[in-house]
Image (spheres, rainbow, N blue to C red):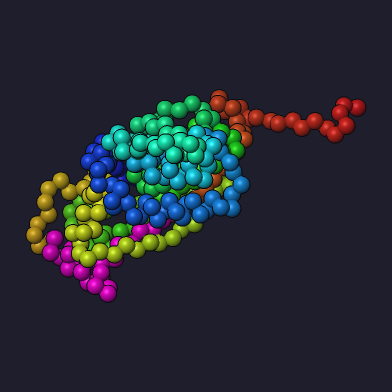
Amino acid sequence: MAGDFHLEAGCIRRHFDAAADSYDGVDALARAVAQQMDERLEGILHQPDAILDLGCGTGRDLRRLAERYPKALRIGADIAPAMLRKATPPVGRVQRLLGRGSRPQLAAADAAALPFAHGRFDMLWSNLMLNWLDDPAPALKEMARVMKVGGMLMFATLGPDTLRELRDAFADAEGQRVHRFIDMHDIGDALVAAGFSDPVMDMDRLTLTYTDLDSLFADLRQSGSANASAARPRGLSGKSAWQRARARYEARRTDGRLPATFEIVYGHAWKPEPRTTADGHAIVHFQPRRGGPR
């Protein structure tokens, strides 16, 4: 699935660490996605005891999860330590009296090597984290490992049409100006291969608008969403290349604003009973006959 596409984890960590102070002011996309994820929980009868928010950033989704599941233990994990430091706001006396003052536990962690025991969680929440991986398969296997049987994964990630205007504007520029994003069907295949069952996915598109192209670049930089591709340009592009790209993007201006499309893939899946042991032997479940032995 990864092919010749590679994202540099160290670069991603540095970008998000640098964006920790500005992130909450420019996270409109993540907030809109979190609301949609939360609404998708309405029809699902699942009351978790322990929740992992993987890619928790500054912890705003942890607060949302506390409102929906006030009795659940919440743990947040993120690759960027500076983001985690922002995820520990002070808890007031009134909040403690209302039972909402328990702080979530936090861990700096790589999604493909989680520092948690097998079967630790019965819900895993991931808002726009999978799109920062070359290949989601190792992370999805880790998610399945740390999840209890019967646990649920709820996630959202970015699809291939994300930032298509920017990609088209820089189509003839050297290097990868915009990340590649994985197709919904490939995500579904990876879920099943990782051991999840009954995946349900849908796709939506959200368009943000900007007064100018520099405002879009500022949002991407201040949210930590700068280019981390190994094939990204390492130097400045020529003036003529920038002028062509800006002109192409400017041609898309509508009602005085420049559009930026984000394709959002939403999904959830379940951790089923294992079919094989750790060493590959099949597990056979025997059901007693009604009425007992005869």
Q: Say whether residue 246 is magenta.
A: yes
Residue positioned 62% across, 35% down in the render: 273
Given residues 235 and 80, the one toward you in this image is 80
> Residue 79, can we see it?
no
Residue 19, quarter of picture: top left
Which quarter of the image is occupied by the C terminus?
top right
Which quarter of the image is occupied by the N terminus?
top left
Residue 173, quarter of picture: bottom left
Q: Measuring from the top left, give residue 208's x and y in whole percent.
A: 32, 62
Read off the magenta span.
242-264
Residue 214 lies left or right of residue 39; in this view the side is left
Residue positioned 25% across, 39% down in the render: 17
What is the residue that sits farthest to the bottom in this orientation? 255
Q: Measuring from the top left, give residue 81's x and y in whole percent.
A: 30, 34
What is the residue that sits farthest to the right in this orientation? 294
Q: Measuring from the top left, give residue 218's x and y in whole percent.
A: 21, 54
Residue 269 lies left or right of residue 4; in this view the side is right
146 is higher (above) or lower (below) than 16: above
Residue positioned 35% across, 31% down in the render: 108
